[in-house]
Image (spheres, grey):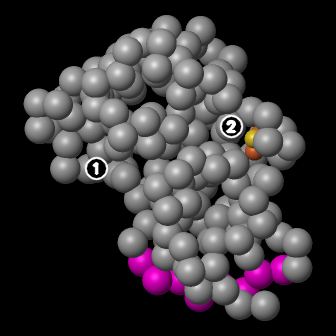
Amino acid sequence: MKIYFELNGESRYEEIEPGESLLSLLRRVGMRSVKSGCETGDCGVCTVLVNGRAVRSCTTFAAQVRGKRVTTVEGLGDVDDPHPLQEAFVEAGAVQCGYCTPGMILVAYELLSENDNPTPEEVRAAITGNLCRCTGYVAIVDAVLLAAEWKREGKWR
Ligand code: FES
Ligand code: FES
């Protein structure tokens, strides 16, 4: 079966297998920022945005994004042209192994799209379903608050 969807602003028409997960599809088409972890919806490393909402791609069928907008970290920025959220994570020292980082950045992007002046408690609530075994979360919360500050200052594109 083929489905049409938008991936990071580009139209895609991809063949999918019956029952294939969105995680599998995105990895197959080269979105290596989308990580595989528990594959049971518990760790958040596979998070992507679908029509601007954070979803677990491991527990989402590829067929469910038919006609929808999918955003991965590749759609925000890269090493040569990072998004301010990515820069904030580096600035705050919120990246260690980096495995959780794409999912963290996308849940933060969803939060800051709706609220560019969150409290630390609101940031913690937003990332609560995303596990990080390296940082202890403090630097991640600092990074999101820094990105929010930059957004309020008009530094986001
Ligand atoms: S791999 Fe999807 S939530 Fe863990
Ligand atoms: S930086 Fe290693 S899991 Fe979060």
**Residue 140 visible to an observer of this rendering:** no
Label 1 sits on residue: 80
In this figure, what is the number of numbered marks? 2
Left or right of 43? Residue 139 is left
Where's the N terminus, which quadrant? bottom right
The answer to whether 74 is drawn above or below residue 118 in the figure is below
85 falls in the magenta region:
no
Q: Position of residue 10 (x, y in %)?
A: 42, 77
CB of mark 2 near ligand 1 (< 8 Å):
yes
Q: Residue at x 57, y 26 (%)?
A: 127
Q: Where is residue 147 in the image (x, y as percent from the top left)?
A: 29, 28
Front-most of residues 119 and 145: 119
Question: Counting residues from the N terminus, which is met first, the one under dot 1 or under dot 2?
Answer: 2
- Around disc 2, counting alpha carbons within 10 Å, would you say few (fewer than 14), some (14 to 19), or many (20 or more)? many
Front-most of residues 3 and 123: 123
- Around disc 1, counting alpha carbons within 10 Å, would you say few (fewer than 14), some (14 to 19), or many (20 or more)? few
